[in-house]
Amino acid sequence: MDRVIYTGMAAAKHLLHRQETLANNLANANTTGFRAELVALRAVPLRGQEAGTRVATVETTLGVDFTPGPMIATGRDLDVAIQGAGWLAVQTPDGGEAYTRNGSLQVAADGTLTLPNGLPVLGEGGPLVVPANASVTVAPDGTVSAKVDGQTAVNAVGRLKLVNPPTEELVKGNDGLFRLRSGEAADADPNVRVAAGTLEGSNVNVVEAMVGMIAAARQFELQMKLLEAARDNEQKANTLIATG
């Protein structure tokens, strides 16, 4: 069997994965705080006897693009955006801790501050709970204050847990949230600041993602033609052998 079949097959497989990654980025072009995933293909020469001329295609996951997204003013008190580097901490369904740049905070029926997907937003002492019928504001240092309707007093509910671990220690999960590679919880960073009434948009470059998808599709077609050429060569060789 022609070895070019394995080369074309491997390239096509990785191009499909690349297309999936680009499509996911494009689908999240309007997702608050989304970080685009990066993927690339590279050629790796094979080692071994009589393998010096063979090259394999290997997918290289570069990780995530941590470039900040655009700041979008909303005027909503519970919308917060991280200024510069940093992350909001949330509690995952398994009781663990994860991090996000999505600052579209909501108040659940029981008063718990959550993300739109229902995950509780963590304060420095655990999930934050605000009184019923209260107006909530968030200070630049993450302090959450509540003013109950009909009262003049403004009470501090707690402070958002804002963290800033090195980006190389973060990994992105299938749920779009980031976690430390060690599986531990990051320490709060008092230097992280937020802007109220603002959300951070996705950092996906729509044009770049679309061009990348078109390029990946054309490269996939090229690999398919390569496989078809290998098949035709095999058929012609078999015909010559049979009639020889």
Image: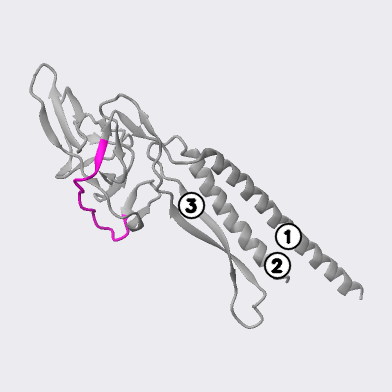
Labelled pair 1, 2 in contact (Cβ < 8 Å): yes
Q: Which mark is residue 194?
A: none
Above or below, 40 against 241 in this view is above
Dot 1 falls on a residue whose secondary structure is helix
Q: Residue furthest toward the right?
A: 243
Residue type for callout 3: Leu
> Secondary structure under badge 3?
strand
Query: Circle 2 — which element?
Result: helix
Q: Residue 198's image quarter?
A: top left
The rendered magenta stretch, by its main secondary structure, is classed as: loop
Residue corresponding to mark 1: 226
- The reply to whether residue 130 is in sight is no
Judging depth in this view, the residue of 211 and 56 nearest the camera is 211
Q: Position of residue 113 (x, y in %)?
A: 22, 34
- Residue at image x 59%, y 58%? 13
Marks 3 and 1: in contact by CB < 8 Å? no
Image location of residue 216, percent across then percent down: 62, 50
User: Residue at left 19%, top 27%?
Assistant: 136
- Where is mark 2, residue-wise? 4
Residue most extreme to the bottom:
49
Q: In the image, what residue type sits under mark 2?
A: Val
What span is colored magenta in the figure?
180-194
Residue at left 55%, top 53%? 17
State the residue position of label 3: 38
